[in-house]
Amino acid sequence: MPFVDQQAPLPQPMRRVLVAGTSGSGKTTFACAFAARTGVPHTEIDALFHGAGWQPRPSFLADVGELAAQPSWVTEWQYGAARPILVAVADTLVWIDLPIRVVMWRVVQRTLRRRLRRTELWNGNVEPPLHTFFTDDEHIVRWAWRTRRKLRDRVPAVARAHPELAIVRLRTAREVRGWLDRLGPAPEVQVSRPAGS
């Protein structure tokens, strides 16, 4: 199936959905929003991969296999060993292909925010000290820059190998919001208030 225009009718059935994008493009935010609007459960693939101390979990590929076998899911399309397992059974791939300047700004902001707040990510991990940007080749900001164009080859190759896969390419934040809005309204957040307030 060729790429689906973002204004085209929504792909169906959209029960096993992959979200592709450069680090910082908003894959997980999108996947959470998709799950909230459709009821399709979201599994964050980073949580399956990262164990304590940023070590890969030995059960990662087995967990990915279990996820892929479920009747419905949405997850991020990353990790070389996991991609073919997931794409083999996916019905839809949403490619968030934002301009590089937007992605890099987002990944820098996110990294700073997480580090300064000591936000716990997966299995007790937190962002490393900021100086590691200069000392660690795998630092997330450097990784995002180095891998920023890889999906330009990877997604078309998957489209050729899996012609049955619906691929939606979203190129701006406005397109991302518009496409999500077509799925239905976002659930309202319920704010609990103390009795008598």
Image (cartoon, rainbow, N blue to C red):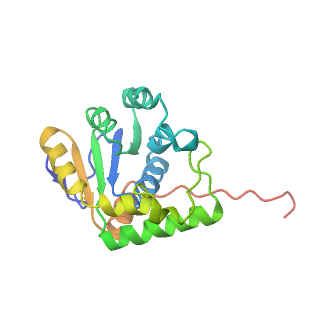
Residue lying at 74% horizontally and 56% vertically, measured from the top left: 192
x, y percent for residue 176: 35, 63
Examine the rendering and report whether any part of residue 41 can be seen: no
Looking at the image, is 85 positioned above or below residue 120?
A: above
Q: In the image, 193: left or right of 53? A: right
Point out the residue furthest to the right here.
Answer: 196
Q: In the image, 188: left or right of 145? A: right
**Numbered-mark total:** 0
Looking at the image, is 125 positioned above or below residue 119?
A: above
Examine the rendering and report whether any part of residue 188 can be seen: yes
x, y percent for residue 58: 47, 29
**86 vs 142, nearest the viewer:** 142
Place residue 147 in its image quadrant.
Answer: bottom left
**131 vs 25, nearest the viewer:** 131
Name the image quarter holding the N terminus. top left
Point out the residue furthest to the front here.
Answer: 135
Looking at the image, is 41 positioned above or below residue 67?
A: below
Q: In the image, 117: left or right of 68? A: right
x, y percent for residue 157: 15, 46
Place residue 65 in its image quadrant.
Answer: top left
Looking at the image, is 4 positioned above or below residue 63?
A: below
Name the image quarter holding the C terminus. bottom right
**67 vs 73, nearest the viewer:** 67
x, y percent for residue 13: 30, 40
